[in-house]
Amino acid sequence: MFDRAAKDLRRLRRIVGIVSKYGYGRAARQSPRLEKAFESVDVEPKVDAALSEPARFRMMLEELGPSFIKLGQVLSARPDLISAAYMEELKQLQYQCIPISYEEIEQAIEDGLGRPVKELFQRVDEVPMATASIAQVHRALTKEGEEVAVKVQRPGIREEIRADLDILYRIAQLFESVVEESVVADPIAIVREFELAINAELNFEVEAANIREFGRHKVGITDIAIPSVFDDLSSDTVLTMSFLHGTAFTRLPEGIDRKAVAKRILQEAFEEVFLAGFFHGDPHPGNILLLDDGRYGILDFGLCGRLTPHMRETLVALSLATALKDADSAARTLYRMGQADSRVSISALRDDLQALYARYLNRRIEDIDSTLMMQEILQLAIRHRIRIPSEYTMLGRAGATIEGLVRSLDPDLDIAVESMPYAQKLMASRMGPESLEGGLSKMLLQFQGLSQDVPIQLSQILSDLSAGNLQITLQGRSVDRLNQTLVMATAAISGAILGGSFVVGAFIALSRVDWAMFGIPVVAIFGAFAGAIIFTWVSAYVVIWPRLKKVRLSNWLPGRRRGS
Protein backbone atom coordinates (compact mmCIF):
# COMPACT_ATOMS: atom_id res chain seq x y z
CA MET A 1 0.00 0.00 0.00
CA PHE A 2 2.81 2.41 0.92
CA ASP A 3 4.64 1.54 -2.31
CA ARG A 4 1.52 2.40 -4.33
CA ALA A 5 1.08 5.68 -2.42
CA ALA A 6 4.72 6.59 -3.07
CA LYS A 7 4.33 5.88 -6.80
CA ASP A 8 1.15 7.99 -6.96
CA LEU A 9 2.95 10.84 -5.18
CA ARG A 10 5.86 10.70 -7.63
CA ARG A 11 3.41 10.67 -10.53
CA LEU A 12 1.55 13.65 -9.07
CA ARG A 13 4.80 15.60 -8.70
CA ARG A 14 5.68 14.84 -12.32
CA ILE A 15 2.24 16.02 -13.46
CA VAL A 16 2.62 19.25 -11.46
CA GLY A 17 6.01 19.86 -13.09
CA ILE A 18 4.69 19.28 -16.63
CA VAL A 19 1.60 21.44 -16.05
CA SER A 20 3.86 24.27 -14.86
CA LYS A 21 6.24 23.78 -17.77
CA TYR A 22 3.46 24.58 -20.26
CA GLY A 23 2.29 27.68 -18.42
CA TYR A 24 -0.71 26.41 -16.47
CA GLY A 25 0.92 26.48 -13.01
CA ARG A 26 0.17 30.15 -12.46
CA ALA A 27 -3.55 29.57 -13.05
CA ALA A 28 -3.47 26.54 -10.74
CA ARG A 29 -2.08 28.68 -7.93
CA GLN A 30 -5.23 30.81 -8.08
CA SER A 31 -7.22 27.90 -6.63
CA PRO A 32 -6.91 27.43 -2.85
CA ARG A 33 -7.14 23.67 -3.41
CA LEU A 34 -4.17 23.61 -5.78
CA GLU A 35 -2.06 26.40 -4.34
CA LYS A 36 -0.20 24.10 -1.95
CA ALA A 37 0.69 21.58 -4.68
CA PHE A 38 2.22 24.34 -6.82
CA GLU A 39 3.76 26.53 -4.10
CA SER A 40 7.26 24.97 -4.43
CA VAL A 41 7.19 24.78 -8.24
CA ASP A 42 8.52 27.31 -10.71
CA VAL A 43 5.35 28.27 -12.58
CA GLU A 44 7.06 30.26 -15.33
CA PRO A 45 6.43 28.63 -18.76
CA LYS A 46 9.37 26.76 -20.30
CA VAL A 47 8.00 26.59 -23.86
CA ASP A 48 7.93 28.98 -26.79
CA ALA A 49 5.63 31.89 -25.95
CA ALA A 50 4.60 32.10 -29.63
CA LEU A 51 2.78 28.75 -29.40
CA SER A 52 -0.99 28.99 -29.36
CA GLU A 53 -2.98 27.95 -26.30
CA PRO A 54 -4.42 24.84 -28.03
CA ALA A 55 -0.94 23.78 -29.21
CA ARG A 56 0.50 24.13 -25.70
CA PHE A 57 -2.43 22.17 -24.28
CA ARG A 58 -1.92 19.36 -26.83
CA MET A 59 1.83 19.20 -26.19
CA MET A 60 1.23 19.06 -22.45
CA LEU A 61 -1.13 16.09 -22.83
CA GLU A 62 1.41 14.29 -25.02
CA GLU A 63 4.12 14.70 -22.41
CA LEU A 64 1.80 13.65 -19.58
CA GLY A 65 1.47 10.22 -21.20
CA PRO A 66 -1.05 7.62 -22.41
CA SER A 67 -3.92 8.35 -20.02
CA PHE A 68 -3.96 12.06 -20.72
CA ILE A 69 -3.55 11.50 -24.45
CA LYS A 70 -6.58 9.23 -24.43
CA LEU A 71 -8.49 11.82 -22.41
CA GLY A 72 -7.53 14.43 -25.01
CA GLN A 73 -8.86 12.16 -27.73
CA VAL A 74 -12.14 11.86 -25.82
CA LEU A 75 -12.30 15.66 -25.53
CA SER A 76 -11.58 16.05 -29.26
CA ALA A 77 -14.94 14.33 -29.81
CA ARG A 78 -16.77 16.72 -27.46
CA PRO A 79 -17.49 19.92 -29.40
CA ASP A 80 -20.03 20.75 -26.71
CA LEU A 81 -17.13 21.24 -24.27
CA ILE A 82 -14.21 22.75 -26.19
CA SER A 83 -13.79 25.24 -29.01
CA ALA A 84 -13.00 24.41 -32.64
CA ALA A 85 -9.34 25.44 -32.26
CA TYR A 86 -8.85 22.99 -29.38
CA MET A 87 -10.73 20.25 -31.24
CA GLU A 88 -8.52 20.56 -34.32
CA GLU A 89 -5.36 20.54 -32.19
CA LEU A 90 -6.40 17.55 -30.08
CA LYS A 91 -7.12 15.52 -33.22
CA GLN A 92 -3.36 15.57 -33.84
CA LEU A 93 -2.56 13.86 -30.53
CA GLN A 94 0.16 11.27 -30.90
CA TYR A 95 2.23 9.48 -28.34
CA GLN A 96 5.85 9.29 -29.48
CA CYS A 97 6.63 6.23 -27.40
CA ILE A 98 9.94 4.40 -27.58
CA PRO A 99 9.54 0.74 -28.65
CA ILE A 100 10.08 -1.65 -25.79
CA SER A 101 12.65 -4.40 -26.21
CA TYR A 102 11.81 -7.71 -27.83
CA GLU A 103 12.74 -9.51 -24.59
CA GLU A 104 9.96 -7.61 -22.79
CA ILE A 105 7.52 -8.34 -25.62
CA GLU A 106 8.40 -12.02 -25.52
CA GLN A 107 7.83 -12.11 -21.76
CA ALA A 108 4.52 -10.26 -22.15
CA ILE A 109 3.33 -12.81 -24.75
CA GLU A 110 4.29 -15.69 -22.47
CA ASP A 111 2.55 -14.05 -19.49
CA GLY A 112 -0.57 -13.39 -21.55
CA LEU A 113 -0.85 -16.80 -23.22
CA GLY A 114 0.74 -18.97 -20.54
CA ARG A 115 3.21 -20.75 -22.84
CA PRO A 116 6.68 -20.03 -24.28
CA VAL A 117 6.70 -18.07 -27.54
CA LYS A 118 8.54 -20.87 -29.35
CA GLU A 119 5.64 -23.21 -28.65
CA LEU A 120 3.09 -20.72 -29.98
CA PHE A 121 4.67 -19.28 -33.15
CA GLN A 122 7.17 -20.33 -35.77
CA ARG A 123 8.54 -16.81 -35.78
CA VAL A 124 7.88 -13.39 -34.24
CA ASP A 125 9.64 -10.42 -35.84
CA GLU A 126 11.78 -8.63 -33.29
CA VAL A 127 11.25 -5.21 -34.94
CA PRO A 128 7.69 -3.94 -34.30
CA MET A 129 5.39 -2.92 -37.14
CA ALA A 130 3.81 -0.22 -35.00
CA THR A 131 4.15 1.22 -31.50
CA ALA A 132 1.46 3.00 -29.55
CA SER A 133 0.79 4.18 -26.03
CA ILE A 134 -1.00 1.00 -24.99
CA ALA A 135 0.33 -1.74 -27.26
CA GLN A 136 2.98 -2.76 -29.74
CA VAL A 137 2.30 -4.79 -32.92
CA HIS A 138 4.65 -7.44 -34.34
CA ARG A 139 4.35 -9.53 -37.47
CA ALA A 140 4.53 -13.28 -36.81
CA LEU A 141 4.03 -16.73 -38.34
CA THR A 142 1.87 -19.36 -36.65
CA LYS A 143 2.83 -23.00 -36.31
CA GLU A 144 0.48 -23.74 -39.24
CA GLY A 145 2.32 -21.18 -41.39
CA GLU A 146 -0.30 -18.41 -41.39
CA GLU A 147 0.93 -14.82 -41.34
CA VAL A 148 -0.52 -12.85 -38.41
CA ALA A 149 -0.24 -9.55 -36.58
CA VAL A 150 0.31 -9.89 -32.82
CA LYS A 151 -0.80 -6.94 -30.68
CA VAL A 152 0.91 -7.01 -27.27
CA GLN A 153 0.00 -4.78 -24.34
CA ARG A 154 2.87 -2.75 -22.94
CA PRO A 155 3.97 -4.09 -19.52
CA GLY A 156 2.98 -1.88 -16.58
CA ILE A 157 0.54 0.24 -18.60
CA ARG A 158 -2.46 -0.77 -16.47
CA GLU A 159 -0.83 0.39 -13.23
CA GLU A 160 0.17 3.70 -14.81
CA ILE A 161 -3.34 4.33 -16.10
CA ARG A 162 -4.88 3.38 -12.74
CA ALA A 163 -2.73 5.99 -10.98
CA ASP A 164 -3.63 8.59 -13.60
CA LEU A 165 -7.35 7.82 -13.24
CA ASP A 166 -7.19 8.50 -9.51
CA ILE A 167 -5.60 11.87 -10.23
CA LEU A 168 -8.09 12.67 -13.00
CA TYR A 169 -11.01 11.99 -10.67
CA ARG A 170 -9.56 14.44 -8.14
CA ILE A 171 -9.14 17.06 -10.87
CA ALA A 172 -12.73 16.44 -12.02
CA GLN A 173 -14.02 16.92 -8.47
CA LEU A 174 -12.13 20.22 -8.29
CA PHE A 175 -13.62 21.38 -11.60
CA GLU A 176 -17.11 20.40 -10.48
CA SER A 177 -16.78 22.55 -7.38
CA VAL A 178 -15.37 25.72 -8.98
CA VAL A 179 -16.32 25.75 -12.70
CA GLU A 180 -19.79 26.95 -13.72
CA GLU A 181 -20.00 24.87 -16.92
CA SER A 182 -19.65 21.68 -14.88
CA VAL A 183 -23.41 21.83 -14.23
CA VAL A 184 -23.92 20.52 -17.77
CA ALA A 185 -20.48 19.25 -18.74
CA ASP A 186 -20.24 17.02 -15.62
CA PRO A 187 -16.45 16.50 -15.45
CA ILE A 188 -16.76 13.42 -13.23
CA ALA A 189 -19.04 11.81 -15.83
CA ILE A 190 -16.48 12.65 -18.54
CA VAL A 191 -13.70 10.93 -16.56
CA ARG A 192 -16.04 8.00 -15.91
CA GLU A 193 -16.74 7.78 -19.67
CA PHE A 194 -13.01 7.93 -20.30
CA GLU A 195 -12.41 5.20 -17.70
CA LEU A 196 -14.89 2.89 -19.41
CA ALA A 197 -13.30 3.57 -22.81
CA ILE A 198 -9.72 3.06 -21.61
CA ASN A 199 -10.62 -0.10 -19.67
CA ALA A 200 -12.30 -1.52 -22.77
CA GLU A 201 -9.23 -0.64 -24.81
CA LEU A 202 -6.97 -2.31 -22.24
CA ASN A 203 -8.99 -5.51 -22.51
CA PHE A 204 -8.15 -7.05 -25.87
CA GLU A 205 -11.01 -9.53 -25.47
CA VAL A 206 -13.36 -6.57 -26.03
CA GLU A 207 -11.56 -5.69 -29.27
CA ALA A 208 -11.72 -9.34 -30.35
CA ALA A 209 -15.50 -9.32 -29.76
CA ASN A 210 -15.79 -6.10 -31.81
CA ILE A 211 -13.89 -7.73 -34.68
CA ARG A 212 -16.21 -10.74 -34.63
CA GLU A 213 -19.29 -8.51 -34.59
CA PHE A 214 -17.98 -6.47 -37.51
CA GLY A 215 -17.29 -9.72 -39.35
CA ARG A 216 -20.90 -10.86 -38.84
CA HIS A 217 -22.20 -7.58 -40.27
CA LYS A 218 -19.97 -7.99 -43.34
CA VAL A 219 -21.09 -11.50 -44.28
CA GLY A 220 -21.91 -11.45 -47.99
CA ILE A 221 -20.07 -8.17 -48.63
CA THR A 222 -17.18 -9.06 -50.91
CA ASP A 223 -15.22 -5.81 -51.13
CA ILE A 224 -14.71 -5.23 -47.37
CA ALA A 225 -12.14 -7.29 -45.45
CA ILE A 226 -12.16 -7.67 -41.65
CA PRO A 227 -9.26 -9.52 -39.96
CA SER A 228 -10.07 -12.79 -38.21
CA VAL A 229 -9.11 -13.50 -34.60
CA PHE A 230 -6.99 -16.49 -33.55
CA ASP A 231 -8.69 -17.37 -30.27
CA ASP A 232 -6.05 -19.87 -29.12
CA LEU A 233 -3.37 -17.18 -29.54
CA SER A 234 -5.29 -14.35 -27.87
CA SER A 235 -6.09 -13.20 -24.33
CA ASP A 236 -6.95 -9.94 -22.56
CA THR A 237 -3.37 -8.66 -23.09
CA VAL A 238 -2.41 -10.37 -26.39
CA LEU A 239 -4.46 -10.23 -29.61
CA THR A 240 -3.49 -12.26 -32.67
CA MET A 241 -5.21 -11.39 -35.96
CA SER A 242 -4.86 -12.39 -39.58
CA PHE A 243 -2.46 -10.12 -41.46
CA LEU A 244 -3.95 -7.88 -44.16
CA HIS A 245 -1.61 -6.95 -47.01
CA GLY A 246 -2.36 -3.50 -48.34
CA THR A 247 -1.59 0.20 -48.51
CA ALA A 248 -2.83 2.74 -45.98
CA PHE A 249 -5.04 5.48 -47.37
CA THR A 250 -2.35 7.98 -46.41
CA ARG A 251 -0.15 6.46 -49.16
CA LEU A 252 -2.52 5.61 -52.01
CA PRO A 253 -0.63 4.95 -55.29
CA GLU A 254 -1.10 7.02 -58.44
CA GLY A 255 -3.70 5.86 -60.94
CA ILE A 256 -6.30 4.93 -58.32
CA ASP A 257 -9.85 6.16 -59.01
CA ARG A 258 -10.05 8.37 -55.93
CA LYS A 259 -13.67 9.37 -56.54
CA ALA A 260 -14.79 5.73 -56.50
CA VAL A 261 -12.73 5.07 -53.38
CA ALA A 262 -14.25 8.09 -51.61
CA LYS A 263 -17.79 7.02 -52.51
CA ARG A 264 -17.24 3.43 -51.29
CA ILE A 265 -15.72 4.55 -47.98
CA LEU A 266 -18.66 6.92 -47.44
CA GLN A 267 -21.14 4.14 -48.25
CA GLU A 268 -19.43 1.85 -45.74
CA ALA A 269 -19.71 4.52 -43.04
CA PHE A 270 -23.44 5.01 -43.73
CA GLU A 271 -24.05 1.26 -43.69
CA GLU A 272 -22.40 1.03 -40.27
CA VAL A 273 -24.45 3.88 -38.81
CA PHE A 274 -27.89 3.57 -40.44
CA LEU A 275 -28.18 -0.17 -41.09
CA ALA A 276 -25.97 -1.98 -38.57
CA GLY A 277 -26.02 0.58 -35.73
CA PHE A 278 -22.44 -0.48 -34.96
CA PHE A 279 -19.66 1.78 -36.18
CA HIS A 280 -15.87 2.15 -36.07
CA GLY A 281 -15.01 4.86 -33.55
CA ASP A 282 -11.61 5.81 -34.97
CA PRO A 283 -11.69 5.50 -38.79
CA HIS A 284 -8.58 7.59 -39.51
CA PRO A 285 -6.73 6.92 -42.81
CA GLY A 286 -4.14 4.70 -41.12
CA ASN A 287 -6.88 2.28 -40.05
CA ILE A 288 -8.26 1.80 -43.58
CA LEU A 289 -6.24 -0.17 -46.15
CA LEU A 290 -6.50 -0.64 -49.88
CA LEU A 291 -5.65 -4.34 -50.11
CA ASP A 292 -3.56 -5.89 -52.83
CA ASP A 293 -6.65 -7.70 -54.20
CA GLY A 294 -8.64 -4.45 -54.48
CA ARG A 295 -10.74 -4.87 -51.33
CA TYR A 296 -10.88 -2.40 -48.45
CA GLY A 297 -9.47 -3.57 -45.14
CA ILE A 298 -10.44 -2.09 -41.75
CA LEU A 299 -8.12 -2.26 -38.72
CA ASP A 300 -8.05 -1.38 -35.00
CA PHE A 301 -11.43 -2.12 -33.43
CA GLY A 302 -10.55 -1.04 -29.90
CA LEU A 303 -13.01 1.86 -30.07
CA CYS A 304 -16.46 1.11 -31.49
CA GLY A 305 -19.86 2.70 -30.95
CA ARG A 306 -23.40 1.38 -30.88
CA LEU A 307 -26.63 3.14 -31.77
CA THR A 308 -30.02 1.82 -30.76
CA PRO A 309 -32.84 1.95 -33.36
CA HIS A 310 -34.32 4.92 -31.48
CA MET A 311 -30.98 6.76 -31.56
CA ARG A 312 -30.64 6.13 -35.30
CA GLU A 313 -34.16 7.42 -35.95
CA THR A 314 -33.46 10.51 -33.85
CA LEU A 315 -30.24 11.11 -35.79
CA VAL A 316 -32.09 10.84 -39.10
CA ALA A 317 -34.78 13.23 -37.83
CA LEU A 318 -32.16 15.81 -36.85
CA SER A 319 -30.39 15.45 -40.21
CA LEU A 320 -33.64 15.85 -42.15
CA ALA A 321 -34.70 18.82 -40.04
CA THR A 322 -31.33 20.46 -40.71
CA ALA A 323 -31.52 19.77 -44.44
CA LEU A 324 -35.02 21.29 -44.55
CA LYS A 325 -33.99 24.24 -42.31
CA ASP A 326 -36.79 23.24 -39.94
CA ALA A 327 -35.46 24.80 -36.75
CA ASP A 328 -38.56 23.92 -34.72
CA SER A 329 -38.29 20.17 -35.46
CA ALA A 330 -34.53 20.31 -34.96
CA ALA A 331 -34.92 21.95 -31.54
CA ARG A 332 -37.38 19.31 -30.37
CA THR A 333 -35.20 16.51 -31.74
CA LEU A 334 -32.11 17.91 -30.06
CA TYR A 335 -34.06 18.08 -26.79
CA ARG A 336 -35.02 14.40 -27.16
CA MET A 337 -31.44 13.43 -27.99
CA GLY A 338 -30.04 14.82 -24.76
CA GLN A 339 -30.80 14.93 -21.07
CA ALA A 340 -31.98 18.17 -19.51
CA ASP A 341 -31.40 18.83 -15.82
CA SER A 342 -33.76 21.78 -15.78
CA ARG A 343 -36.53 23.30 -17.88
CA VAL A 344 -35.43 24.05 -21.45
CA SER A 345 -36.94 26.83 -23.52
CA ILE A 346 -37.67 25.12 -26.84
CA SER A 347 -38.53 28.45 -28.45
CA ALA A 348 -35.16 29.98 -27.47
CA LEU A 349 -33.33 26.90 -28.75
CA ARG A 350 -35.33 27.09 -31.98
CA ASP A 351 -34.39 30.74 -32.50
CA ASP A 352 -30.69 29.97 -31.99
CA LEU A 353 -30.87 27.06 -34.45
CA GLN A 354 -32.64 29.27 -36.98
CA ALA A 355 -29.80 31.80 -36.77
CA LEU A 356 -27.24 29.00 -37.15
CA TYR A 357 -28.99 27.58 -40.23
CA ALA A 358 -29.11 31.04 -41.76
CA ARG A 359 -25.31 31.24 -41.49
CA TYR A 360 -24.55 27.79 -42.91
CA LEU A 361 -27.26 26.59 -45.23
CA ASN A 362 -27.15 29.47 -47.72
CA ARG A 363 -23.68 28.39 -48.84
CA ARG A 364 -22.64 25.97 -51.53
CA ILE A 365 -22.41 22.33 -50.44
CA GLU A 366 -18.64 22.22 -50.85
CA ASP A 367 -18.27 25.33 -48.67
CA ILE A 368 -20.21 23.90 -45.70
CA ASP A 369 -18.03 22.64 -42.87
CA SER A 370 -20.41 20.08 -41.38
CA THR A 371 -18.00 19.34 -38.53
CA LEU A 372 -18.01 22.97 -37.44
CA MET A 373 -21.79 23.14 -37.86
CA MET A 374 -22.22 20.07 -35.63
CA GLN A 375 -19.89 21.63 -33.09
CA GLU A 376 -22.04 24.75 -32.94
CA ILE A 377 -25.23 22.69 -32.63
CA LEU A 378 -23.76 20.85 -29.63
CA GLN A 379 -22.56 24.14 -28.17
CA LEU A 380 -26.16 25.33 -28.38
CA ALA A 381 -27.13 22.23 -26.42
CA ILE A 382 -24.77 23.05 -23.56
CA ARG A 383 -25.88 26.68 -23.61
CA HIS A 384 -29.46 25.48 -23.14
CA ARG A 385 -28.50 23.00 -20.41
CA ILE A 386 -28.88 19.84 -22.51
CA ARG A 387 -26.41 16.99 -22.11
CA ILE A 388 -25.66 15.00 -25.25
CA PRO A 389 -24.96 11.24 -24.79
CA SER A 390 -21.41 10.09 -25.53
CA GLU A 391 -22.54 7.84 -28.43
CA TYR A 392 -23.50 10.90 -30.47
CA THR A 393 -20.25 12.69 -29.71
CA MET A 394 -18.21 9.60 -30.65
CA LEU A 395 -20.19 9.40 -33.89
CA GLY A 396 -19.54 13.10 -34.48
CA ARG A 397 -15.81 12.57 -34.20
CA ALA A 398 -15.86 9.49 -36.44
CA GLY A 399 -18.01 11.35 -38.95
CA ALA A 400 -15.63 14.30 -38.99
CA THR A 401 -12.71 11.94 -39.64
CA ILE A 402 -14.54 10.20 -42.50
CA GLU A 403 -15.60 13.55 -43.97
CA GLY A 404 -12.01 14.79 -43.93
CA LEU A 405 -10.82 11.62 -45.68
CA VAL A 406 -13.60 11.76 -48.28
CA ARG A 407 -13.05 15.47 -48.98
CA SER A 408 -9.35 14.83 -49.53
CA LEU A 409 -10.20 12.15 -52.12
CA ASP A 410 -13.16 13.86 -53.79
CA PRO A 411 -13.91 17.47 -52.77
CA ASP A 412 -17.05 17.56 -54.96
CA LEU A 413 -18.82 14.56 -53.41
CA ASP A 414 -22.23 15.58 -52.00
CA ILE A 415 -22.32 13.78 -48.66
CA ALA A 416 -25.94 14.77 -47.91
CA VAL A 417 -27.19 13.30 -51.20
CA GLU A 418 -25.26 10.06 -50.60
CA SER A 419 -26.79 9.69 -47.13
CA MET A 420 -30.43 9.99 -48.23
CA PRO A 421 -30.93 6.38 -49.53
CA TYR A 422 -29.69 4.98 -46.21
CA ALA A 423 -31.88 7.31 -44.16
CA GLN A 424 -34.90 6.41 -46.34
CA LYS A 425 -34.12 2.70 -45.99
CA LEU A 426 -33.98 3.07 -42.20
CA MET A 427 -37.32 4.91 -42.09
CA ALA A 428 -38.91 2.40 -44.49
CA SER A 429 -37.76 -0.51 -42.34
CA ARG A 430 -39.55 1.07 -39.38
CA MET A 431 -42.76 1.24 -41.41
CA GLY A 432 -42.51 -2.25 -42.95
CA PRO A 433 -44.99 -5.04 -42.15
CA GLU A 434 -42.54 -6.94 -39.94
CA SER A 435 -41.68 -3.84 -37.94
CA LEU A 436 -45.32 -2.82 -37.61
CA GLU A 437 -46.24 -6.33 -36.52
CA GLY A 438 -43.49 -6.28 -33.89
CA GLY A 439 -44.49 -2.80 -32.80
CA LEU A 440 -48.15 -3.83 -32.49
CA SER A 441 -47.18 -6.83 -30.36
CA LYS A 442 -45.06 -4.63 -28.10
CA MET A 443 -47.91 -2.14 -27.77
CA LEU A 444 -50.37 -4.90 -26.83
CA LEU A 445 -47.96 -6.32 -24.26
CA GLN A 446 -47.41 -2.87 -22.75
CA PHE A 447 -51.16 -2.21 -22.66
CA GLN A 448 -51.78 -5.57 -21.00
CA GLY A 449 -49.18 -4.84 -18.32
CA LEU A 450 -50.58 -1.35 -17.83
CA SER A 451 -54.14 -2.66 -17.43
CA GLN A 452 -52.93 -5.01 -14.70
CA ASP A 453 -50.63 -2.54 -12.91
CA VAL A 454 -52.88 0.52 -12.75
CA PRO A 455 -55.60 -0.96 -10.44
CA ILE A 456 -52.94 -2.29 -8.06
CA GLN A 457 -51.05 1.02 -7.96
CA LEU A 458 -54.29 3.02 -7.55
CA SER A 459 -55.30 0.76 -4.66
CA GLN A 460 -51.91 1.33 -2.98
CA ILE A 461 -52.25 5.11 -3.33
CA LEU A 462 -55.76 5.10 -1.81
CA SER A 463 -54.61 2.81 1.02
CA ASP A 464 -51.65 5.09 1.84
CA LEU A 465 -53.91 8.14 1.68
CA SER A 466 -56.45 6.70 4.11
CA ALA A 467 -53.67 5.59 6.51
CA GLY A 468 -51.93 8.95 6.38
CA ASN A 469 -48.77 7.43 4.87
CA LEU A 470 -48.88 9.17 1.50
CA GLN A 471 -45.70 11.13 0.81
CA ILE A 472 -45.21 13.59 -2.04
CA THR A 473 -41.72 14.67 -3.09
CA LEU A 474 -41.31 18.01 -4.87
CA GLN A 475 -38.21 18.98 -6.83
CA GLY A 476 -37.31 22.13 -8.67
CA ARG A 477 -35.34 25.33 -8.49
CA SER A 478 -37.95 27.13 -6.38
CA VAL A 479 -38.09 24.26 -3.89
CA ASP A 480 -34.29 24.19 -3.70
CA ARG A 481 -34.15 27.95 -3.07
CA LEU A 482 -36.83 27.63 -0.37
CA ASN A 483 -34.88 24.83 1.28
CA GLN A 484 -31.68 26.89 1.14
CA THR A 485 -33.48 29.91 2.66
CA LEU A 486 -34.83 27.79 5.51
CA VAL A 487 -31.37 26.37 6.21
CA MET A 488 -29.86 29.87 6.26
CA ALA A 489 -32.61 31.20 8.54
CA THR A 490 -32.22 28.26 10.92
CA ALA A 491 -28.46 28.75 11.01
CA ALA A 492 -28.85 32.49 11.70
CA ILE A 493 -31.36 31.97 14.52
CA SER A 494 -29.33 29.14 16.09
CA GLY A 495 -26.12 31.16 15.86
CA ALA A 496 -27.74 34.23 17.36
CA ILE A 497 -29.14 32.23 20.29
CA LEU A 498 -25.86 30.42 20.88
CA GLY A 499 -23.74 33.57 20.60
CA GLY A 500 -26.08 35.54 22.83
CA SER A 501 -26.03 32.74 25.40
CA PHE A 502 -22.25 32.88 25.59
CA VAL A 503 -22.28 36.65 26.16
CA VAL A 504 -25.10 36.58 28.75
CA GLY A 505 -23.56 33.58 30.53
CA ALA A 506 -20.21 35.31 30.66
CA PHE A 507 -21.66 38.40 32.32
CA ILE A 508 -23.66 36.33 34.83
CA ALA A 509 -20.50 34.42 35.75
CA LEU A 510 -18.60 37.71 36.04
CA SER A 511 -21.19 39.14 38.47
CA ARG A 512 -21.05 36.12 40.76
CA VAL A 513 -17.43 35.02 40.66
CA ASP A 514 -14.47 37.35 40.34
CA TRP A 515 -12.24 35.16 38.15
CA ALA A 516 -9.32 37.24 36.99
CA MET A 517 -5.76 36.75 35.86
CA PHE A 518 -3.40 39.69 36.11
CA GLY A 519 -6.45 41.84 36.69
CA ILE A 520 -8.23 40.67 33.51
CA PRO A 521 -11.74 39.11 33.86
CA VAL A 522 -11.12 35.75 32.12
CA VAL A 523 -14.74 34.53 31.97
CA ALA A 524 -16.05 37.75 30.46
CA ILE A 525 -13.30 37.89 27.86
CA PHE A 526 -13.84 34.23 26.92
CA GLY A 527 -17.60 34.65 26.60
CA ALA A 528 -17.35 37.80 24.50
CA PHE A 529 -14.70 36.20 22.29
CA ALA A 530 -16.78 33.04 21.75
CA GLY A 531 -19.86 35.12 20.99
CA ALA A 532 -17.93 37.23 18.47
CA ILE A 533 -16.64 34.11 16.68
CA ILE A 534 -20.13 32.61 16.43
CA PHE A 535 -21.63 35.89 15.15
CA THR A 536 -18.84 36.22 12.56
CA TRP A 537 -19.24 32.64 11.35
CA VAL A 538 -23.01 32.91 11.05
CA SER A 539 -22.76 36.24 9.22
CA ALA A 540 -20.26 34.79 6.74
CA TYR A 541 -22.42 31.71 6.19
CA VAL A 542 -25.67 33.63 5.72
CA VAL A 543 -24.41 36.68 3.83
CA ILE A 544 -21.33 35.56 1.87
CA TRP A 545 -21.84 31.87 1.02
CA PRO A 546 -25.04 32.26 -1.07
CA ARG A 547 -23.30 34.92 -3.15
CA LEU A 548 -20.27 32.81 -4.02
CA LYS A 549 -20.43 31.75 -7.66
CA LYS A 550 -18.54 29.23 -9.69
CA VAL A 551 -15.98 30.36 -12.24
CA ARG A 552 -17.19 30.52 -15.85
CA LEU A 553 -14.41 28.62 -17.60
CA SER A 554 -15.33 29.84 -21.07
CA ASN A 555 -14.40 33.39 -20.05
CA TRP A 556 -10.79 32.26 -19.57
CA LEU A 557 -10.44 30.36 -22.85
CA PRO A 558 -9.07 32.51 -25.69
CA GLY A 559 -10.85 30.40 -28.29
CA ARG A 560 -14.23 31.07 -26.70
CA ARG A 561 -13.67 34.82 -26.44
CA ARG A 562 -12.80 34.96 -30.10
CA GLY A 563 -15.95 33.02 -30.90
CA SER A 564 -14.08 30.07 -32.35
Image (tube, grey):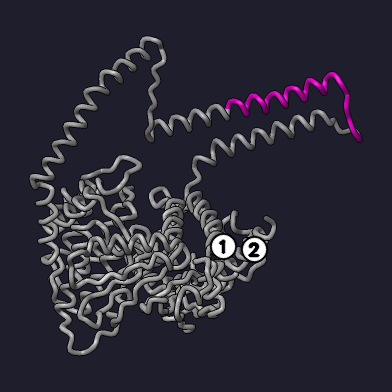
Helix, strand or loop at disc 2?
helix
Give the answer, above or below, for where 427 lies relative to 402: above
- Which residue ends up furthest to the top in the rendered image? 466
Whether the residues at callouts 1 and 2 have beta carbons within 8 Å, the answer is yes
Name the outermost residue toward the right.
518
- Main secondary structure along the magenta-highlighted residues: helix
* Disc 1 residue type (three-letter): Glu
Q: Disc 1 or disc 2, which is closer to the eye?
A: 1
Q: Which mark is residue 172?
A: none
The residue under label 2 is 7
The amino acid marked with disc number 2 is Lys
- Magenta residues span 493-518
Looking at the image, tell me whether mark 1 or mark 2 is earlier in sequence order: 2
3D distance between C-alphas at marks 1 and 2:
10 Å
Task: Please say if 259 is above or below 454.
Answer: below
**Residue 68 in the image, given as x and y percentages of width and height:** 48, 65
Residue in view at x 40 percent, y 30 percent = 479
Q: In which quarter of the image is residue 264?
A: bottom left
Residue at 41%, 76% in the rendered image: 142
Magenta highlight on residue 171? no
**315 or 472: nearer the eye?**
315
Horizontally, is 218 left or right of 209 in the view? left
